[in-house]
Each structure stands twice: as C-alpha cells, then as structure tokens.
Amino acid sequence: MGLMSRLGRIVGGRANAQIIEGYREELRALHVKVGRLDEELHQLRKQTRETVDDLGDRIGAMSERLNSAS
C-alpha cells in the first residue's frame, strides 16, 4: 500500500468520523425535539379532555334548564 493510499484512508476515515458525529448530533437534537413534542401532545390531550368534559357539563345543565322550563 502506497503512502498516498494510506493518507487517503486516514483523511477519508476522519471525514467519515466527522460525518457520523454530525449525524449523531442531529439525532440527539431530534430526540430532544420529539421529547418536547410528546410533552406538548400530552398537554393538548389533557386540555381537550377537560374542554370536552366542560362542554358536556354545560350541555347537560342547559338540557336540565330546558326540561324544567317545559
């Protein structure tokens, strides 16, 4: 194996390592974003349940008023 071939492998290996490290950092960043989105989704589900429950209570109260007025 010639000197140029060896240098090419060293430089190529470093470039590959840098590319892999870049992907690793991007993957970590995506993992953090997914964690945040999961928490936001949990909060939205909770708010939706509370809103639906509140709406059901209001409709029930309105129905009772209408039934008692008749």
Image: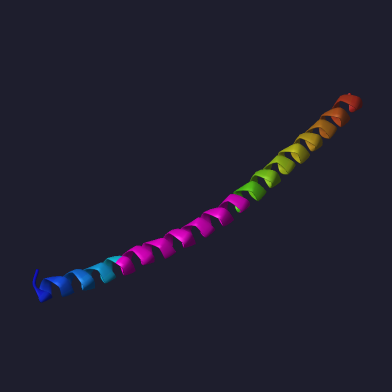
Q: Seen in the image, is 54 located left or right of residue 17? A: right
Colour treatment of the image: rainbow
**Is residue 16 depicted above or below 31 in this figure?**
below
- Residue 14: give x, y in percent of width and height: 28, 71
Q: Residue at x 50, y 56 (%)?
A: 31
Q: Seen in the image, is 36 located left or right of residue 65? A: left
Residue 39 vs residue 4, the one in the foreground: 4
Q: Residue at x 77, y 40 (%)?
A: 54
Q: Residue at x 19, y 69 (%)?
A: 9
- Residue 64: give x, y in percent of width and height: 86, 28
Q: Seen in the image, is 51 located left or right of residue 69? A: left
- Residue 5: give x, y in percent of width and height: 12, 71
Q: Seen in the image, is 6 located left or right of residue 42? A: left
**Is residue 14 depicted above or below 61 in this figure?**
below
Q: Is residue 29 magenta?
A: yes
Q: Residue furthest left?
A: 2
Q: Write the start and end of the magenta stretch as one range.
A: 17-39
Q: Is residue 9 magenta?
A: no
* Quarter of the rendering containing residue 10: bottom left
Residue 46 vs residue 65, the one in the foreground: 46
Task: Please tell me whether the stretch drawn in magenta is mainly helix, strand or loop.
Answer: helix
In what quadrant of the picture does the N terminus appear? bottom left
- Residue 20: give x, y in percent of width and height: 34, 63
